[in-house]
Image (cartoon, helix red, strand yellow):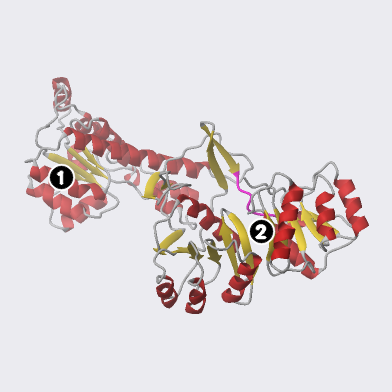
Amino acid sequence: MINRGINKLKKALISVWNKDKIIDLSKFLVKNDFEIISTGGTKKILEDNQIKVTSISEVTNFNEIMNGRVKTLHPKIFGGILADKNNESHLEDLKSIDSTIIDLVVVNLYPFEDMSKNSDLSFDKLIEYIDVGGPSMLRAAAKNFQSVIALCNPALYENFMIEYSKNSGIIDYESRKEYAKQVFLETSKYDSLIFNEFSKNNSEELSNSLNINLSKTFDLRYGENPHQISSFYTDKDISIFKQLSGKKLSYNNFFDIETSIRIVNEFDEICCCIIKHSNPCGFAIGNNLIESFDRAVSCDPVSYFGGIVGFNKKITADLAKKLIEPFLECIVCPDIDDDALEILKMKKNLRVIVYNNNYNFSNISVRSVLGGMLSQSSSTKFNEQDWQVVTESKPDKINFNALRLGWKIVKYVKSNAIVIANDKQIIGVGAGQMSRVDSVKIAIQKCKENGFDFSNAILASDAFFPFSDSIEVANKNGIKHFIQPGGSIKDKEIIKISDKLKVSMIFTNQRLFFH
């Protein structure tokens, strides 16, 4: 029979790595006539604060062994946690081993997640931070939530104390069940982190299983459209970015923000990119951020309206004054002056995002589809040693720099993707067309609309040219340098036509589809 108003509590087991708020909770427990049993570091900090504590080894008559690896794994402890208070047989079993009920289990776990971020810590050292006793005690208490309360997070202590005081020592069934749910959330997340760490390897193989355990970080303004609700979930802290001002982020903002960060971090030079609907509509390098911003805007001075603007250097007040003139959704940067931030805050809706330049994006991407999940390695790096100049005409140094710039940008454009660029900026983009030659025509049209000539211009294509039409259309407009993956059954024909047109062409041997 479920007892919905279980009797008052008497004994608490406390063993915590995170000592936050533990003194306040322990003093509350002592005031309410709890006996506290504890271990090692927790016991010491409680005693240092004049809180009476019984050592677990006194309860078990068993000292810690193996440098503390074994200290709570004992029948007297787990019997006390797992015993059903309404089951006479359980109570008799406890008596037979000289043990008693443990009513409250306050445990949090070794900081495996935090330690896994320490690049100086070897894997062999890291596994010492895998908690064994803690999750075992929490799971036992959560399973037996009708008789035992489990508090796995300092954030839960205050509500526990309020309810205990309000109800004369009684914690109701629903609260107990909620505490138990939090335990299983915490321990499943903990196990997922450990699994994912063990699954890391340098091989070309993907893992045989995906273990994804995410917690809601915050709700978003809306989803892809205003009628859709949306939230952001993560399995770790969001140390990659921080919002300093502006209205709440929406679903689409996240894709654009990530694209802007990825693009600007492709370059060592001072640069700026402008993103619309996950596509770059402007990108440029310059001697300073103002010059690079002006150039990026010139790529498409119509489309940048309402865009997300990303930089790879610190924003100053002079630049901020320019950025508040047009309507923009977000400003994304690695750092910003206080004066610059105050200027940008003058536009209350303008989101200002600062990102961590040292953050390493995951090398695996995951996407839900057809009731399952697709996983793939990320298309992040290329090796110029794999590039081949396949034509008689060769690009000079300036042309080659432009080809490199175009190739870095085209992988962030939705397929079929075409980028026309020089060695300082992109000057035309054709994105998302079903026909590659249509993307070429759109990119050329953009160049002409915005007053660019094609001297020293290059054309980058995310996939091979199946026909010569794209090259012929581009060359007719003065483009003489091309970069593409190659791999078509008509490669020889494409090379032959390129030689006839006296244009240069690089095969990268790497396709860059993006959907």
- Left or right of 136 on screen, residue 230: right
- Left or right of 262 on screen, residue 329: left
Helix, strand or loop for disc 2: helix
Query: Can you give x and y, in whole percent of width and height, for residue 331 in the image?
Result: 49, 65
Quarter of the view holding residue 309: bottom right
Residue at (15%, 50%) from the top-left corner?
26
Give the number of the disc on residue 409: 2
How far apart are the alpha carbons under marks 2 and 1? Answer: 61 Å
Q: What is the three-letter code of the residue carrying label 1?
A: Ile
Residue 139 on the magenta span = no
Instruction: Examine the rendering and report whether any part of residue 85 can be seen.
Output: yes
Q: Which residues are magenta?
A: 377-382
Classify the position of the N terminus by image quarter.
Answer: top left
Which residue position holds label 1?
Answer: 36
| Residue closest to the far bottom | 318
Classify the position of the C terminus by image quarter.
Answer: top right
Helix, strand or loop for disc 1: strand
